Amino acid sequence: MPVAPEQHLFRALTDAPPTPLVAASMLGADFSRLGAEALDVMQAGCDLLHLDVMDGHFVPNLTMGPDLVAGLRRACPGICLDAHLMVQHPQEFIEPFVHAGADHLTIHVEAEHPQADPRATAELIRKAGLTAGLAINPGTDLEKILPYVADFELLLVMSVQPGFAGQSFRPEVLAKTEALSAAAPSGVRIQMDGGVAPVNAEACRKAGCDVLVAASAIFKAEDRRSAIESIRGPVSQADS
C-alpha cells in the first residue's frame, strides 16, 4: 500500500511510534466499499483502523462481526486493526476476533469478566498474542478503572455514550482523561473515542491522549488528509 514517506506502518500497538496516532473509526465509512475506504484513509495518513464491535446487549446496537474484520484484514494486510469490544461478555469474543485478524482488543471496565476482574480478560487476550485495552464510559466513575491502569497497553476514554455513531463530543470527560493519563505508567497509550474532530483534538491531546479515534470527522471531510493532520496536531522532531 503506498504511504507517505513519513508514515510508519505497524500492526502491534507496541511497535507504534511515540507520536500522536490517528485511528479511523470504520463506523463512519461507506459500508458498500469498506476495503476501499480503509485503504483511502490509510493513504491519507491514518495510523490504524478502529473497529466498533457491538453485541446488542452491552449497547443497544449491532455492528461489526469477525467476518467483517477478516475482510478488512484481507484488504489491509499490514495495518493495525484495533477492535473495540462494546460487548457484555468479552471473553467469548476473543478467539473469533483473533482468528479474524485483529491486532488489539479493547474491553470495557463495565462489562462482565471472569472473577469480576478485567485483568483476567486481559490475560486471555495476551495469551492469544494481542495487546489489550480497557475502556471507560462517560458516566462511570474514574475510581472503577484506576486499579487497572498498569495492566493494559491502552486505556480508552469514551467521550460519548457507546452504541451509536454521530454523537457530539462531551468536553467534561477531559478532566477524567487528565487524571487517567497522570495515573497511567509511562508507555501506556491513552485513547479518546467519540465525536473527536479537528475542533477538539488539541484539547484531547493536552489532556493526555495520544491515540485519537475519529469517524465522521475523517470520512465526511472534503480533504481527509487535512482532517487527519489537524487531529494529529504538530509532531516535533523529538517525537518522530
Image: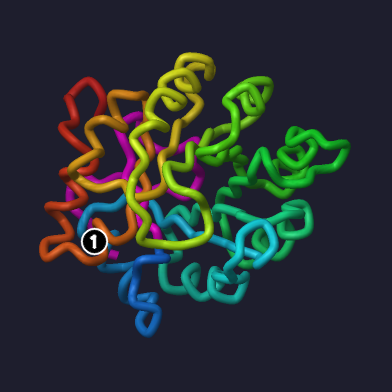
Of 87 and 164, the residue lying toward us: 164
Can you say whether 183 is above or below 217 in the image? above
x, y percent for residue 132: 62, 40
Look at the image and say whether residue 8 sits in the magenta stretch.
Answer: yes
Label 1: how many residues lie within 10 Å, few (<14), some (14-19) or many (20+)?
Answer: some
- Residue at 61 percent of width and 55 percent of height: 86
- Residue at 18 percent of width and 42 percent of height: 199
Can you say whether 80 is above or below 190 in the image? below
Q: Main secondary structure of the magenta part?
A: loop
- Residue at 29 percent of width and 29 percent of height: 205
Q: Quadrant of residue 26?
A: bottom left
Q: Which residue is mark 1?
A: 43
Helix, strand or loop under label 1? helix
x, y percent for residue 71: 51, 75
Quarter of the image where the C terminus is located: top left
Of 52 and 8, the residue lying toward us: 52
Quarter of the image where the N terminus is located: bottom left
x, y percent for residue 129: 67, 46
x, y percent for residue 2: 23, 63
Residue at the bottom extreme, as displayed:
32
Can you say whether 153 is above or below 30 in the image? above
Look at the image and say whether residue 49 sits in the magenta stretch.
Answer: no
Residue type at numbered disc 1 = Gln
The magenta segment is 1-25
- Residue at 39 percent of width and 52 percent of height: 48
Please give left or right for residue 232 compared with residue 164 in the image. left
